[in-house]
Amino acid sequence: MTVILPEATLVVLTGPSGSGKTSLLRQMVGLIPAKGARRFLEGREYLPSDISRFRAEVLLLSCGAAMIAGTIWDNLTFVFGLKNRGDRCFDESRARELMEYLGLGYLRWSQRVRDLSLGERHRLALVRALLWDPKVLLADEPFTGLDPESYTRAFKLLSRQARRPGRASLCVIHEPVPKGVDILFRLESGGLKRIF
Ligand SMILES: Nc1ncnc2c1ncn2[C@@H]1O[C@H](COP(=O)(O)OP(=O)(O)OP(=O)(O)O)[C@@H](O)[C@H]1O
C-alpha cells in the first residue's frame, strides 16, 4: 500500500471501526512495524535509523491525546526541548491565541492536565501540534469529545494548517466527513480506496 500526501492538502481517511486506520498511521511513523516500509518526505528518504527526525516532521496526533504528567505549560513546551527537533521555539503568544480560539482561554498554564476533560485534552493536543508546525500532521480522530462549536473551530485550524505551502495533513475522521476535504480515502477489508 502506498500513501502519498500532496503538498498543501487536507486528506481524510475514514472507514469502519477496526479497519486499521490507527494502525496505518502508526505504521507510517514507525510506531508499529511495517515490513518493507519506505518513508519519503520532500523527495528525501528517511531510513529507519533516522526515524526520530522523520517523526519530528511527520507528527502523529494520537487518538486519546497523549499527554505527559504535569501542567499545561509542561505539555506545550517539553517537545521544544527534545534533541533532533530542529530549531523550533515555543511561541507563548501564539499558544494563548490558539487556546482562546479553541475555547480554552479560561485555563491557566499551571493547571494539571490530569484534571482536564477528554475534549479539553484533545484541543490542547491540537494546540501543541499546531505550535510545533510539522510538515505533515497525521491526526487520529482529533475531534473526539468536542462540542459542535469546538469541532468546527478545530477543523478550521487543521484545514488551514494542512493547506499551507510545504505542509499537508492526513486526518482520520469517522463519517459523516465534513465539507472542505481535498482528498477522501476509505479503508475497508478490500484495502485503501480513494473516494475523491
Ligand atoms: N496493539 C495491538 N495488538 C493487537 N491487535 C491490535 C492492536 N492495535 C490494534 N489491533 C487490531 O488491529 C485492528 C485494527 O485496529 P485499528 O485501531 O487500527 O482500527 P481503526 O480503524 O483505527 O478502528 P477505530 O475506528 O475503532 O479506531 C483491530 O482488529 C484491532 O483489534
Image: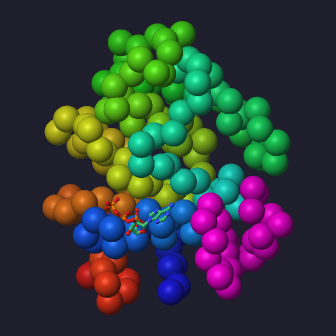
Where is residue 31, by image quadrant?
bottom right
How far across and how far down the image is residue 117, in percent? 34, 25
| Depth check, front residue: 7 or 196 | 196
Q: Residue at x 37, y 17 (%)?
A: 105
Residue 33 located within the stretch drawn in magenta: yes
Q: Can I make out residue 184 in this image?
A: no
**Residue stretch rendered in magenta on the structure:** 29-53
Picture layout, residue 60 above or below residue 116: below
Q: Residue at x 62, y 22 (%)?
A: 74
How far across and how far down the image is residue 179, in percent? 20, 61
Image position of 180 (left or right of 138): left
Q: Count the labels in the image.
A: 0
How far across and how far down the image is residue 95, in percent? 52, 26
Q: Can I make out residue 17 in this image?
A: yes
Q: Residue at x 16, y 61 (%)?
A: 176
| Depth check, front residue: 189 or 154 | 189
Image position of 134 (left or right of 102): right
In the displayed image of the protein, which residue is found farthest to the bottom? 190
The C terminus sits in image quarter? bottom left
* Colouring scheme applied when the structure was drawn: rainbow
How far across and how far down the image is residue 185, in percent? 33, 76
Where is residue 104, by image quadrant?
top left
Picture layout, residue 130 above or below residue 138: above
Ligand 1 lies in quarter = bottom left
Where is residue 14, by image quadrant?
bottom left
| Depth check, front residue: 91 or 191 | 191
Residue 17 located within the stretch drawn in magenta: no
Q: Residue at x 49, y 49 (%)?
A: 61
